[in-house]
Image: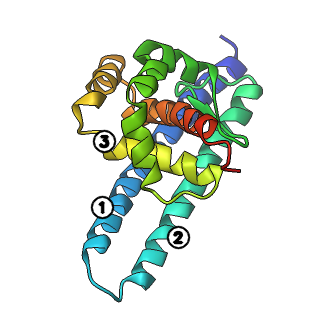
Amino acid sequence: MSKFGFIKSIGDLFLADLKAAIIGRLSSVETKIDGLNKDMDKLDGGVSEIKNEVKSLNCRTFKLESAAIEIQNILQMAGASVCQKLSIGPGSPLKLMPYGEEIAKDVDAYKFVEVNKDFLFQSIENKNHKTPYDVQEASMKVLREYLSNPIMDAFKSYAFSKGIRIDDILDVAGIILRDEYLKAHPEIK
């Protein structure tokens, strides 16, 4: 192995570990933020300033995660191999990447959305959406809120058996749910 190949291999391992650490940390922060949001909803009055701060944290977390994904895309285009495959890719709107399509097929995410459409659509409608972006966020949020529901057991079993984060599966299913919801509601623009 040449010096460059050795250095590239070490760099690939470092970048994969860095991305995994960043995403793991961001996931932990998002979980805490969601918990804070739920706790604040229970409080009476005077929490609007705190809510705004939490929303700001949530926005910054999303930006960090987006930056990590963009860095990974650039590195992959430059030829670096990355251990953490992308399930959804950047763009407007977010789209499934080939790995995301593979996950969708393996967990039968399209059928999952179709079978649970009425229940999931109603949950999205309760989120007060006005734009396609709102629908996208609501789709992701709804799936995370129902993670303890037995309808999600197949997703959790797949994540465990493959050693992947449940968030990858929920993101994939969320994109599919978003697309189906927007198809059913063309008035949302």
Local packing at callout 1 (Cα closer than 10 Å; few below 14, some 14-19, many 20+) is few
Q: What element carries label 1?
A: helix
- What residue is pinned by disc 1? 35
**Residue found 68% across the figure and 25% down from its top:** 80
Disc nearer the start of the sequence (3/1): 1
Q: Are marks 2 and 1 in contact (CB under 8 Å)?
A: no
Picture coordinates of residue 4, whole percent (x, y): 72, 22
> Does the image show residue 22?
no
Q: Is 162 drawn above or below residue 133 in the view shown?
A: above
Q: Which of marks 3 and 1 is in front?
A: 3
Picture coordinates of residue 88, whole percent (x, y): 59, 32
Q: Nearer the viewer, residue 4 or 186?
A: 186
Disc nearer the start of the sequence (2/1): 1
Left or right: 89 as drawn, with respect to 145 = right
Q: Which residue lies furthest to the right in this view?
A: 78
Q: What element carries label 3?
A: loop
**Residue found 30% across the figure and 64% down from its top:** 38
Left or right: 161 as drawn, with respect to 83 = left
Q: Which quarter of the picture shows residue 148?
A: top left
Q: Which quarter of the picture shows residue 15?
A: top right
Picture coordinates of residue 94, whole percent (x, y): 65, 39
**Mark seen at residue 56:** 2
Local packing at callout 2 (Cα closer than 10 Å; few below 14, some 14-19, many 20+) is few
- What residue is pinned by disc 3? 146
Q: Residue furthest top?
A: 1
Q: Which of marks 3 and 2 is in front?
A: 3
Q: What kind of residue is marked 3?
A: Tyr
